């Protein structure tokens, strides 16, 4: 029994040593801009950008394969920070084209909720409150609108709604152009 334990320990030590040497020898340095972009990302790996995670989104953004507006949970603030790092112009005439997107959050219709707990087990930010066989609700400040809870809800009780404006997330709407206002040259 002692020989078996000693041989397994020696084999584990030897294989660990080989893996450690291989990791140091074949290590690939990532560009510093990728690490800087990844630190700005929300880090929830929700996949709303169409990429498998925040690291792959940062890598794609660093080489210019995706626009700086790729992250809906990060919103306008993240897009502006990413534009500063990558040097992209966000003006309407520029190639970045910051499009106004209304922030979305999950909303649970309580009369349809059965309390199955599938949604809050799937939520990456713990934005859903509830217990087994109890009604669930969403904490809008914590919700990133990633669709994870909507996909698993068996009763389709969860939908997306625009995020309610509070003092923390309030901003001015873009003013309507004169052509869009009634009585100002636009269609009335």
Image (cartoon, grey):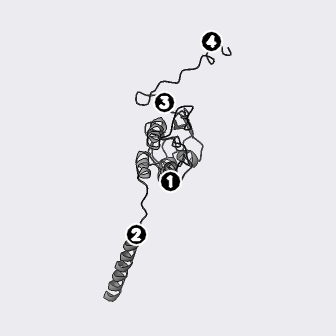
Point out residue 132 in the picture as x, y percentages from the top left corner: 47, 48
Identify the mark nearer the N-term, 4 or 1. Answer: 1
Identify the mark nearer the N-term, 1 or 2. Answer: 2
SS type, badge 3:
loop
SS type, badge 2:
helix
Identify the mark nearer the N-term, 2 or 4. Answer: 2
Quarter placement of the C terminus: top right
Position of 134 with respect to 95 (left or right) is left
Q: Residue at x 42, y 60 (%)?
A: 29
Q: CA distance from mark 3 to mark 4?
A: 30 Å
Identify the mark nearer the N-term, 3 or 4. Answer: 3
Position of 164 with respect to 10 (left or right) is right
In the rendered image of this protein, does residue 12 appear above or below residue 137? below
Identify the mark nearer the N-term, 3 or 1. Answer: 1
Pointer 2 residue = 23
Pointer 3 residue = 164
Q: Residues within 10 Å of mark 1 (few under 14, many from 20)?
A: some
**Residue 33 visible in the displayed image:** yes
Nearest to the eye among marks 3 and 4: give it: 4
Q: Which mark is residue 93?
A: none
SS type, badge 1:
helix
* The one of 46 and 150 positioned closer to us in this rendering: 46
| Most distant residue in the right direction | 187
Pointer 4 residue = 184
Point out residue 28 in the picture as x, y percentages from the top left corner: 43, 63
Nearest to the eye among marks 2 and 3: give it: 2
Q: CA distance from mark 3 to mark 1?
A: 31 Å
Q: CA distance from mark 1 to mark 2?
A: 21 Å
SS type, badge 4:
loop
Pointer 1 residue = 56
Q: CA distance from mark 2 to mark 4?
A: 68 Å
């Amino acid at each position: 029994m002692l020989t078996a334990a000693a041989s397994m320990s020696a084999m584990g030590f030897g294989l660990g040593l080989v893996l450690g040497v291989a990791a140091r020898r074949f290590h690939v340095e990532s560009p510093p801009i990728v690490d800087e972009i990844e630190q700005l990302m929300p880090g929830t790996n929700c996949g709303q950008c169409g990429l498998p995670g925040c690291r792959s989104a940062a890598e794609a953004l660093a080489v210019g394969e995706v626009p700086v507006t790729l992250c809906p949970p990060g919103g306008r603030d993240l897009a502006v920070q990413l534009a500063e790092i990558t040097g992209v112009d966000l003006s309407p005439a520029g190639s970045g084209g910051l499009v106004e997107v209304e922030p979305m959050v999950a909303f649970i219709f309580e009369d349809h909720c059965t309390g199955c707990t599938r949604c809050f087990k799937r939520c990456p930010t713990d934005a859903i409150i509830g217990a087994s066989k109890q009604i669930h609700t969403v904490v809008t400040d914590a919700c990133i609108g990633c669709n994870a809870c909507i996909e698993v809800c068996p009763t389709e009780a969860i939908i997306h709604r625009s995020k309610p404006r509070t003092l923390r997330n309030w901003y001015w709407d873009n003013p309507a152009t004169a052509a869009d206002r009634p009585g100002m040259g636009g269609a009335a």
